[in-house]
Image (tube, rainbow, N blue to C red):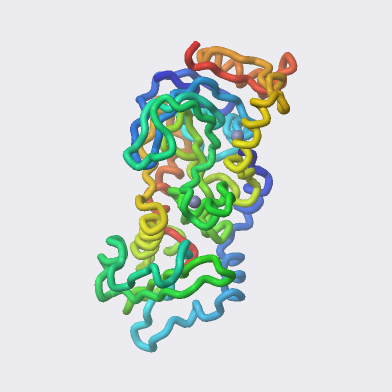
Amino acid sequence: MKAVTWRGVNEIGVEDVPEPTILNDHDVIVEVGLSATCGSDLHLMGGYIPAMRGGDVLGHEFMGRVGEVGPGVTKHQVGDRVVVVSFVGCGKCWYCREGLWSLCDNGNPNPGLTDALWGQGIGGCYGKFPLGAVMNKALTLRGAQQHGHRYIPEILDRMSRDEVKTEHLATHVMALDDGPEGYRMFKEKEDGCVRAVFRPGG
Amino acid sequence: MTTSLGSVVSLAARAGSSVVRQVRSVVDPSHARPAGAERPASGWLVVTLVGEPSEIDTDRLHAPLAEFGDQLEVRVRAAPGGKGTELGARLRDRPSGSTLTRLSGSDPRADLRSALRRAKQLIEVGEVLVVDPGPHGERAPTPGGTLLEMWTRVAPQAGVR
Ligand SMILES: [Zn+2]
Ligand SMILES: [Zn+2]
């Protein structure tokens, strides 16, 4: 599949990358319909997150259609339209049960360092695009994150009743091939760019 | 997600183990004095689990912990504040290792630390999270990336305690 990737400091590319596969029983693979730029991408782009590697896939705020489900998935089936929150939430730990998804105890594959920094392994984040099971290598900060999962149902409900409008945020909707240009415009806030949104389907 | 980058960097800069050690010695002054005189057992490593203490059968531990056999001592008790159950484990005849070896996952308890984390995931979720391999483009070597690869190899075993 095609993906927007980080090639180096302020250098964005479009590459062919391998298809994602189901790694966990509870994984789903989402065929991305739209993917938005996010302010945190600017940290990644500018090289402020030291662990970025050339070839890392960008984009962690996206929506689309479920294309494949793991054997443990009960809530979704192929064809469902979904909005994805970038945090990995196991749904079972104390934090997830309390709706504190971004504090999930079980979503961090590299807990050792964050144990040392913050006293506990913090939540992990889908750092890549589309939803493979790859994360932002545990570089998210516990406590500074929005529990997005909690609010999505309400926001979608209000959007369906026309009480919340979001069109004005997606100022620049582009093809995925225009990823480098979109990220540049987003960074420079050129042409009133609030969010560049990419449409992998063209 | 929006991270406060400044605080990440400053925290990282201040992350000297001395800070961690100070905090820890206030919380648990016993860590420096493991029980047993001649061949001390390692200190307790503990994870907090959802559910009641009665739900943990210490005679039928999950595979990652069961592998340690008689070497392992296990402790189960209610977590404070109604936050579930504390599952503690320590190895007999095994010292705790230095801060440096703990942080780099090369101390005598490194395997136990990893096993306890996997056991928690099995008990709570039913599977251990796998994240690699994930799709990526052509790899260009970067200093940070090399460090990350090294870290990813040791991280499951590494920890403060
Ligand atoms: Zn969780
Ligand atoms: Zn974001």
- Residue at the farthest front position: A161
Question: Against B5, is B14 above or below?
Answer: below
Residue B81 at x, y = what percent? Answer: 59, 70
Asked whether, in this view, residue A23 is left or right of residue A163, the answer is: left
Foreground of the two, A15 or B103:
A15
Q: Quadrant of residue A50?
A: top right
Foreground of the two, A96 or A21:
A96
Residue B57 at x, y = what percent? Answer: 33, 70
Foreground of the two, A84 or B151:
A84
The structure residue drawn at horizontal position 49% and vertical position 54%, both measured from the top left corner, is: A105
Asked whether, in this view, residue A185 is left or right of residue B68, the answer is: right
The structure residue drawn at horizontal position 73% and vertical position 14%, both measured from the top left corner, is: A191
Question: Against A97, is B101 above or below?
Answer: below
- Residue at the farthest top position: A202
Q: Quadrant of residue B61?
A: bottom left
Asked whether, in this view, residue B47 is left or right of residue B56, the answer is: right
- Residue at the farthest right position: A192
Asked whether, in this view, residue A142 is left or right of residue B75, the answer is: right
Residue B127 at x, y = what percent? Answer: 35, 50
- The quadrant the N terminus of chain B occupies is top right
Q: Quadrant of residue B118?
A: bottom left
Residue A51 at x, y = what percent? Answer: 50, 40
The structure residue drawn at horizontal position 48% and vertical position 28%, both measured from the top left corner, is: A129
The structure residue drawn at horizontal position 57% and vertical position 33%, both measured from the top left corner, is: A44
Answer yes or no: is residue A149 visible: yes
Question: Against A104, is B141 above or below?
Answer: above
Answer yes or no: is residue A7 visible: no
Foreground of the two, A135 or B41:
A135
